[in-house]
Amino acid sequence: MLTSPAMLDEVSERLQNKFTLPAEEVCTLRDIMLVYSRLVEPKITLKVVEADEKDNKVVECAVEGNADFIVTGDKHLLILKKYKDTGIISPAKLLEML
């Protein structure tokens, strides 16, 4: 599993604002993500997701980390189906594959 500083920031912000988790719990969850993920710092900037430019950070992370797949429920990413050598699939599709 890959993550980037930008992706960690977005997850933290959503957990705190949308799900109103206390800052301490958000920090704990962020630390857990770091334990189970490889942190990559993309050196590239892509503009492949026009409908929601914030989603480009996910593709940038995948490219930088040489990911085989992006697993997501985000419709703006799923519509791409693939970017270069990286497939873009839903969690249900991943479970089907496993």
Image (cartoon, rainbow, N blue to C red):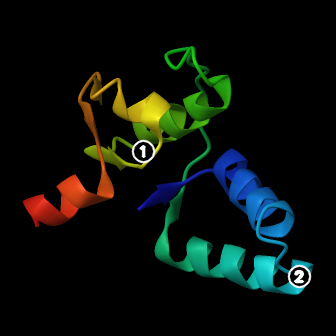
Residue 59 on image: x %, y %? 48, 33
Q: Secondary structure at mark 1?
A: loop
Reply above or below: 29 against 94.
below
Give how far apart the Cα atoms at labels 2 and 1 are. 31 Å
| Foreground residue among 89 and 56 | 89
Among the 4 quarters of the image, the one containing residue 16? bottom right
- Where does label 1 land, which residue? 65
Q: Is residue 80 left or right of residue 62?
A: left
Reply above or below: 50 against 40.
above
Reply above or below: 21 against 44.
below
Q: Residue at x 58, y 23 (%)?
A: 44
Location of the C terminus (image quadrant): bottom left
Q: Residue at x 67, y 31 (%)?
A: 54
Question: Comparing marks 2 and 1, which lies closer to the viewer?
Answer: 2
Residue 15 on image: x %, y %? 75, 67
Q: Residue at x 65, y 50 (%)?
A: 7
Q: Amino acid at mark 1?
A: Gly
Residue 48 on image: x %, y %? 49, 16
Location of the N terminus (image quadrant): bottom left
> Which label number is shown at residue 22?
2
| Foreground residue among 70 and 75 | 75
